[in-house]
Amino acid sequence: RERLKEKKMKSILILTSPLLDIEKRIADFEFPKSLIPQLWKIENPEDALIIASPKDEVLNQKPLFEKSLKNIELVGVDDSHRLLDFKNYLPDIENYIQSQS
């Protein structure tokens, strides 16, 4: 998305249970070492729809709900990290896409 912004191209970003900071992991299982160099720490996401659960059992998502974020539509859900009820969030995604088009 950042490359598209540089080219003045519009994009719509939707994040589900996002891993914004690997240090926010609370699950005790090994993360693939080959992926770690590809991760960016994102402290203040902006211009996106985020669907996350404060009860996420893999990532500490609570900071998303505790601070003000720039141009973020945050959908807090009562679900697991895997978002097993994802179909219930499709209207939120559709509304967000329509609002950004």
Image: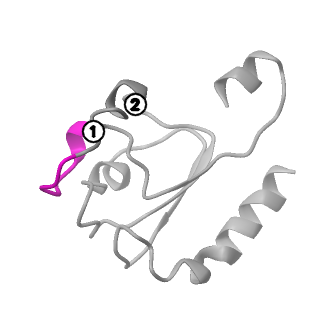
For disc 1, the marked residue is: 22
* Prevailing secondary structure class for the magenta stretch in the rendered image: loop
Q: Amino acid at mark 2?
A: Leu
How far from the left and from the top, in percent, is residue 60? 24, 54
Q: Is residue 69 above or below residue 98?
A: above
Residue at the location (70% across, 76% down)? 91
Q: Are the residues tagged 2 and 1 within 8 Å (C-beta)?
A: yes
Residue at the location (83% across, 61% down)? 98
Q: Amino acid at mark 1?
A: Ile
Quadrant (top left/top right/bottom left/bottom right) for the N terminus: top right
For disc 2, the marked residue is: 39
Quadrant of the rendered image containing residue 94: bottom right
- Judged from this view, the residue extending furthest toward the left is 28
Element type where label 1 sits in the image = helix
Element type where label 2 sits in the image = loop
Quadrant of the rendered image containing residue 12: top right
Q: CA distance from mark 2 to mark 1?
A: 8 Å
Q: Is residue 5 above or below residue 83?
A: above
Q: Which residues are magenta?
A: 22-30
How far from the left and from the top, in percent, is residue 96? 72, 60
* Labels 2 and 1: the sequence-earlier one: 1
How far from the left and from the top, in percent, is residue 53? 37, 67
